[in-house]
Amino acid sequence: METKAQSLHEAIAMLNQGRQLPLADIQTPPPPPSIKGIMDGSQETNAGISLLVSIRYRSLSDHLKDRDVLIRRVIRNKNDLYLDGVAMDIRAPRLIKVAHILEIRDITSGRVYQDPLEFIENRLGVSLPKTRVKKEPKNEFPKVIERTAQEMTALMYLVAIDGQRDTRERKVVFDYIKSRTLDLTYPDTDLNEYLISLAPDTESFSVALGQILKKEKDVVQRFIEAVLDVIMIDGKVDPRERSFLVRLMDVLEKDGYEITLPI
């Protein structure tokens, strides 16, 4: 399915006009040569993530750091994994080598992961060799993330677009993800904690939306219906939300979707 990226960018820009979010968007500066070499030879493993965690790690310059980091994606370079994200204390992009991570704390649940590979599989939905990570029995939440991470990122961005996180809107997202994962077994608390931990910004939303629109047509159809449900649950539609939907629907209609806007 082809989409007009420019139209989507314009729609996203309109959606963001005047918004009041706790997380400022980060303009990524050109990386230093050492980082650029890693990025140029990397493969994206999972993108469209926007998960806020606390990480203790050794930097690429071998300094011990303890920071809150907004994880945007996981990348692989040869045999090494890296977390690409934003260090929230300095509002700057950071590339963290997974092998250098000493501890990851899930800020929402308070759970501490001593093994970063366990976190990457169980909380970021990245499949790893089975011999390297011990999975919790009968908990398929990693598959939930693998299947729907981008949808969760995009929907939670819309939940927070007015500067508030309405519990009714989050419940819409929760119910939508449950409907997409009826074949998987996992605790509801895992899904709730993950949704609360998400802190999407414009870049994460844009990447997530682009990936969603490449999925199967029925998935896109259901996602757009969830978008409408999130926006309409409080009985009112912000003018920015209306303009965003009109532009998004225009793009989708060109790809054969028939969706009526109840606004």
Image (cartoon, grey):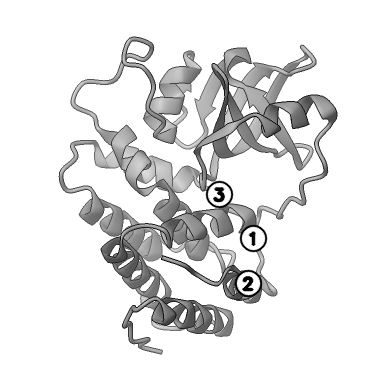
Residue 56 position, x and y percent, is 63, 19
Q: Residue at x 70, y 26 (%)?
A: 38
Q: Which residue is mark 1?
A: 21
Q: Residues within 10 Å of mark 3 (few under 14, many from 20)?
A: many
Q: CA distance from mark 2 to mark 3?
A: 25 Å
**Mark 2 — residue?**
6
Residue 170: x and y in percent read: 39, 59
**Which of 167 and 251 lies nearest the eye of the viewer?**
251
Residue at figure coordinates x 80%, y 36% from the top left: 31
Q: Where is mark 3, residue-wise?
A: 199
Camera-side residue of 24 and 32: 32
Sequence-first disc among 2 and 3: 2
Q: Is residue 40 visible?
A: yes
Q: Residue furthest bottom?
A: 263
Structural distance between the alpha carbons of marks 3 and 1:
10 Å
Q: Secondary structure at mark 2?
A: helix
Whether residues under marks 2 and 1 lie with C-beta atoms below 8 angstroms apart, the answer is no
Q: Residue at x 43, y 81 (%)?
A: 254
Badge 2 amino acid: Gln
Q: From the viewer's perspective, is residue 138 above or below residue 12?
A: above
Please identify, in this view, whether the residue under mark 2 or under mark 1 is nearer the observer: 2
Q: Are marks 3 and 1 in contact (CB under 8 Å)?
A: no
Position of the C terminus, as image quadrant, is bottom left
| Quadrant of the frame with the N terminus | bottom left
